[in-house]
Image (tube, grey):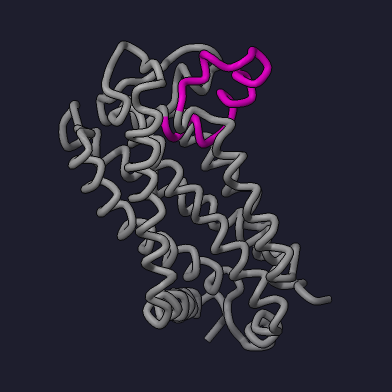
Amino acid sequence: MTVLATVPVDTAAAARRILLTYRRSPGLMAASLAVPVAMVGVFGYVFGSAVRVPGGGNYREYLMPGLFALVAVNGLMPTMVGAARDAGRGVTDRLRSMSVSRFGLLLGQALADLLVAAVVLVPTAAVGLAAGWRVRDGLGPALGAFALLLLFRFTVTWVGTTLGLAVGKEETAGQLAVLVFPFAMVANVFVPTGGMPGWLAAVADWNPISAVAAACRTLFGNPVELGGAWPMQHPVAATLGWCALLLAVFVPLAVRRFASAGR
């Protein structure tokens, strides 16, 4: 059997390994569920009266697509730390010594994380509905929005894998993972970018997270600020473009780093 023919088997085995990690660490899954749910309460009610929503709509309807995008990008942190931990403990070296597909192993990890993200989105959406968030444009566009979110989550896991393998140390990866939050703040997740200084608004408009949030707001029929830079005028196309670009860059980089880790 060639290495290429083992891709499905290796993908399934790697996915099972990641899912077992969550099964044996209920605290990890609980934290994944609790963080976005807590953010609905904290940001939805603390910032709600202080933020001017585009079109004068409900702030929690504006907020929820941003939090969905945040759930998607949060996949980068555990993936980066996990890849660095495996590299530091020699797990990557052991896997690489076997006759297995490098791409299949990494794909399995990404698909397992995608399943976890889908599970986390369910209670987040339920809490959002309880807080007043609504889907305004029907089931089809809403399913398109969730598909974009999962595509973006799948994309950022490859970025996290590449960075984790490049760092190679769990402690360093944990420190770098904290930087995801300020990166997410320079976006339209919590507030419209129109009120930011010009240079910062330009950075935020070209942030991929802003494109995902604006695309979801458009597809859900929630308040959205369309204007400014091209990604904000065409958020769905911009999201697909960012995902295609990032996958084209980071999938081969991740496979290459996995093949050469520790050398």
Residue 66 appears anywhere in the view: yes
Q: Quadrant of the C terminus?
A: bottom right
The reply to whether the magenta stretch includes residue 200 is yes
Residue 43, image x, y percentages: 39, 37
Nearest the viewer among 212 and 247 is 212
Residue 109, image x, y percentages: 50, 69
Nearest the viewer among 193 and 84 is 193
Residue 148 appears anywhere in the view: no
Nearest the viewer among 11 and 212 is 212
Q: Residue at x 22, y 38 (%)?
A: 131
Question: Vertically, is 137 above or below 260?
Answer: above
Question: Vertically, is 167 above or below 260?
Answer: above
What is the quadrant of residue 119 in the picture?
bottom left
Instruction: State which region is magenta.
Output: 191-213
Q: Residue at x 54, y 51 (%)?
A: 156
Instruction: Give the number of callouts.
Output: 0
Residue 198, image x, y percentages: 64, 12
Q: Residue at x 61, y 39 (%)?
A: 183
Residue 86, image x, y percentages: 64, 77
Q: Residue at x 65, y 57 (%)?
A: 252
Q: Residue furthest left?
A: 138
What is the quadrant of residue 76 in the picture?
bottom right
In screen coordinates, is 131 left or right of 171?
A: left
In screen coordinates, is 38 left or right of 262?
A: left
The reply to whether the magenta stretch includes residue 159 is no
What is the quadrant of residue 113 in the picture?
bottom left
Nearest the viewer among 6 and 142 is 142
- The kind of secondary structure the magenta stretch mainly shows is helix
